[in-house]
């Protein structure tokens, strides 16, 4: 079968991401070193938030509980730092725009409502996108096989009709398990 659909990851593919900017901001605004701020951030909570199992309010409450009491971070500083993760559009955006003339373009990304709100306001590529698969809406995250199966179902294509473009090898490998082509 011919390729009809291309799925793009967002962070690290269409947008530059800057986790260190976020960590540094949190460190400065909580009286920690960057290494301490990074260690204070519980990744399992992040994964729950980005798979839609925690509301924004509950996410911050649980972050605050996990954060060292001697170096608290305010809600406003936490969310300001959170937004610093997103950077400028990459050169891949021009490729997406060109490909949209011949293929159905979908986004398939581990993400959250705050970042999508900003993306919808600022990203030049959104008008070229046919559909979106966001982890917080799908209830699972890459590299879980379920999100790739869900994406194919939503786009109404079989794996061999789709290409998935990502910046992490494990995500490509899992996508290939569905028959998708990976880049």
Image: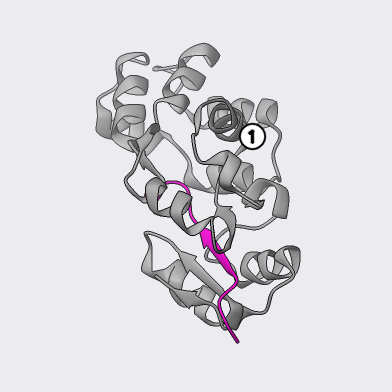
Residue 178 seen in the current view: no
- In the displayed orientation, state which residue is furthest to the front: 101
Give the image's coloring scheme: one colour
Relative height, residue 107 to residue 154 (above, below):
above
Relative height, residue 5 to residue 97 (above, below):
below
- In the displayed orientation, state which residue is furthest to the bottom: 1
Residue bounds of the magenta highlight = 1-13
Depth order, front residue of 96/38 = 96
Would residue 114 be found to the left or right of residue 39 on screen?
Answer: right
- Number of on-image labels: 1
Would residue 147 be found to the left or right of residue 93 on screen?
Answer: right
**Mark 1 secondary-structure assignment:** helix
Q: Residue at x 68, y 25 (%)?
A: 57
Q: Quadrant of the N terminus?
A: bottom right
Asked if residue 50 is among those painted magenta in the image, a careful observer would answer no
**Position in image of residue 147 (x %, y %):** 64, 64
**Position in image of residue 90 (x %, y %):** 34, 43
Structural crowding at the residue carrying mark 1, measured as other residues with C-alpha within 10 Å and reported as few (<14), some (14–19) or many (≥20): some
The secondary structure that dominates the magenta segment is loop
Depth order, front residue of 163/48 = 163
Relative height, residue 146 to residue 8 (above, below):
below
Q: Residue at x 54, y 30 (%)?
A: 63
Residue on which the image places disc 1 = 113
**Position in image of residue 131 (x %, y %):** 67, 52
Q: Quadrant of residue 61?
A: top right
Q: Residue at x 51, y 27 (%)?
A: 122
**Position in image of residue 138 (x %, y %):** 71, 54
Q: Quadrant of residue 182?
A: bottom left
Asked if residue 4 is among those painted magenta in the image, a careful observer would answer yes
């Amino acid at each position: 079968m011919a390729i009809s659909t291309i799925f793009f990851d967002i962070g690290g593919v269409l947008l530059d991401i800057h986790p260190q900017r976020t960590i540094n901001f949190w460190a400065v605004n909580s009286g920690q070193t960057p290494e301490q701020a990074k260690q204070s951030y519980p990744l399992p909570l992040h994964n729950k938030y980005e798979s839609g199992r925690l509301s924004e309010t509950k996410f911050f409450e649980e972050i605050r509980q996990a954060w060292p009491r001697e170096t608290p971070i305010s809600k406003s500083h936490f969310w300001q730092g959170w937004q610093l993760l997103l950077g400028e559009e990459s050169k891949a955006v021009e490729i997406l725009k060109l490909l949209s003339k011949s293929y159905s373009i979908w986004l398939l990304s581990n993400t959250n409502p705050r970042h999508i709100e900003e993306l919808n306001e600022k990203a030049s590529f959104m008008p070229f996108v046919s559909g979106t698969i966001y982890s917080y809406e799908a209830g699972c995250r890459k590299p879980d096989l379920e999100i790739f199966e869900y994406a194919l179902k939503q786009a109404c294509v079989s794996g061999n009709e789709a290409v998935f473009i990502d910046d992490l090898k494990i995500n490509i490998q899992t996508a290939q398990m569905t028959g998708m082509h990976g880049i």
